[in-house]
Amino acid sequence: RLGPMRVGPYGLLQGVADGAIPTPDAEAAPAGDAPSSVRSVDVTQKARSLRGLLPGLELVVERFTRNVRGTLATFFGQLPTVNVNGVDLLPYGTFLARLPRPISLQLWKLTPLRGQGALVATPGLVGALLQVFFGGPLGRKATPPTREYSPIEQRMLERLAGRVLGDLREAWKPVEPLECPYVRAETNPLFATICGPDEVVMVIELGIELDGIEDGGLSVCIPNAALEPVRPRLTKLAPSGGEDVQAPDPSWTQRLKDALIAAEVEVSA
């Protein structure tokens, strides 16, 4: 109906937004009259799932989930159940809008990549941590805070963030050695500008099940543009022979050679 057009995907999206490219009228063709082989596609939708698309990323998420399980066990004294609820791409503004309140975003650097990431714990997990941290029983139902976090609670969240970021650093080792240094905490999303609200971020959401915890979870948010340098490595698995296979250490190889040269051997001829 529009005739031949030569536009790229971004030009097409801009044309839909500006109204230059007409869209179907919702009242012109009721959904019930459409053939079964026709389905509606929203080309302006930025959110999509990455589950099963990037094998290298699947390895990172699997290792991260296992590491977080061990870290939370040291906090609670009991092994929790940690599930991957989603690995998605979505606008940063959408991610912030759907976070439960109160909120505390723990910001960290993506060294050696550019930019910063954000770590968020749900109020349910924070309430359980506070109860156990101050001597309460684990099985007792914890009431999540409904106000802004106090300085003591913020300090506890920083302690949790330090351990979880260490788990994330270990999980990334087979793909890209990330340092993940902690930067600061923000309770106001307006000051947690790791990217623009319309820019796409990758969000890893973990669900945590444990006695006394309701809606427990952790979310890791990384700007999608920051992952461009390592994206080729995310499309493949680690080298065969195990996920922990790493390149030989040159200094260790040299020390072995020096030790062999200095070794004394008795020879009988």
Image (tube, rainbow, N blue to C red):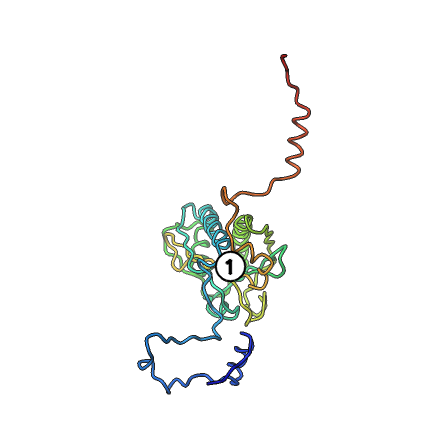
Taking depth in this image into account, of 137 and 72 the one nearest to the observer is 72
Which residue occupies the extreme front position in the image? 4
How many marks on residues?
Answer: 1
Task: Say which amino acid is labelled 1.
Answer: Val
| Residue 6 in view of the camera | yes
Taking depth in this image into account, of 193 and 188 the one nearest to the observer is 193
Q: Could you say which quadrant of the image residue 151 lies in?
A: bottom right
Q: Is residue 8 above or below residue 136?
A: below
The kind of secondary structure element at disc 1 is strand
Residue at image location 67% in from the left, 34% down from the top: 254
Residue at image location 52% in from the left, 46% down from the top: 239
Which residue occupies the extreme left position in the image? 32
Q: Is residue 244 above or below residue 109?
A: above
Q: Position of residue 11 (x, y in %)?
A: 56, 77
Taking depth in this image into account, of 74 and 32 the one nearest to the observer is 32
The residue identified by callout 1 is 220
Q: Is residue 13 above or below residue 264?
A: below
Q: Could you say which quadrant of the image residue 112 lies in?
A: bottom right
Q: Position of residue 160 (x, y in %)?
A: 51, 53
Residue at image location 61% in from the left, 61% down from the top: 115
Q: Is residue 189 above or below residue 15?
A: above
